[in-house]
Image: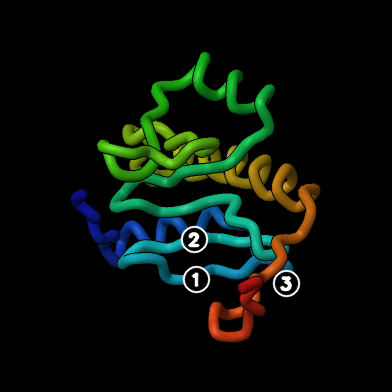
Amino acid sequence: MEMPKASDADKARFRAVVPETPEVVIKPMFGNLGAFVNGNMFAGLFGPTIGVKLSEADKATLERTERTVPFGPAERPMGGYTGLPEIWNGDGDDEARARVWVEKAFEYVAGLPPKTTKAPKSARVSKK
C-alpha cells in the first residue's frame, strides 16, 4: 500500500482551510495531517488530497455536485470520508470552497460523542 507524503505546500493549504478554534487539534499522521475535534478526525490530508467526514446528506450533496475522489489509499479508501476535488488547487475561490466543506465536517463531527481512549494493552485485565 502506497502512502504518499504531503508536501509543505499541501500542509499549508490544509491548515489554511481548517477552522482556527481551540477545539481543533492538528496531528501528523503517516507523513500527512489529520484535524480532530473531541478526539475524532473530521478532516485529513493524504498526499495532496483533503478528505472530510460529513453527514450523509452533506456527503451526498458534495458527491453529486462536485468531482470528489476517494480518500486514502487506492486499495482501501477510508470509509465515511470523501476527498475534495483535486482540481481545487488552493487559489482564493478554491480555498473558500474547500473551507466551507471542512467547516461542515467540523460541525458534524463536533456533534458526535467524544472518542474515548483505550487503556494500553499492558494495563488491560486478562479474563483467563
Q: Are marks 2 and 1 in contact (CB under 8 Å)?
A: yes
Residue at coordinates 24% horizontally, 55% vertically from top-left?
Answer: 3
Instruction: Tell me the SS state at disc 1.
Output: strand
**Residue at coordinates 34% horizontally, 42% vertically from top-left?**
89
Q: Quadrant of the C terminus?
A: bottom right
Which disc is residue 27 wearing? 1
Q: What's the distance in space between the residues labelled 2 and 1, CA to CA?
A: 5 Å
Q: Secondary structure at mark 2?
A: strand
Comes first in the chain, label 1 or label 3: 3
Residue highlighted by disc 3:
22
Tell which residue pokes out farthest to the front in this image. 128
Q: Nearer the viewer, residue 44 or 39?
A: 39
Amino acid at dot 3: Pro
The span from disc 3 to disc 2 (Cα, nearest Å) is: 15 Å
In the figure, 39 relative to 107: above or below? Answer: below
Residue at the location (66% across, 26% down)?
56
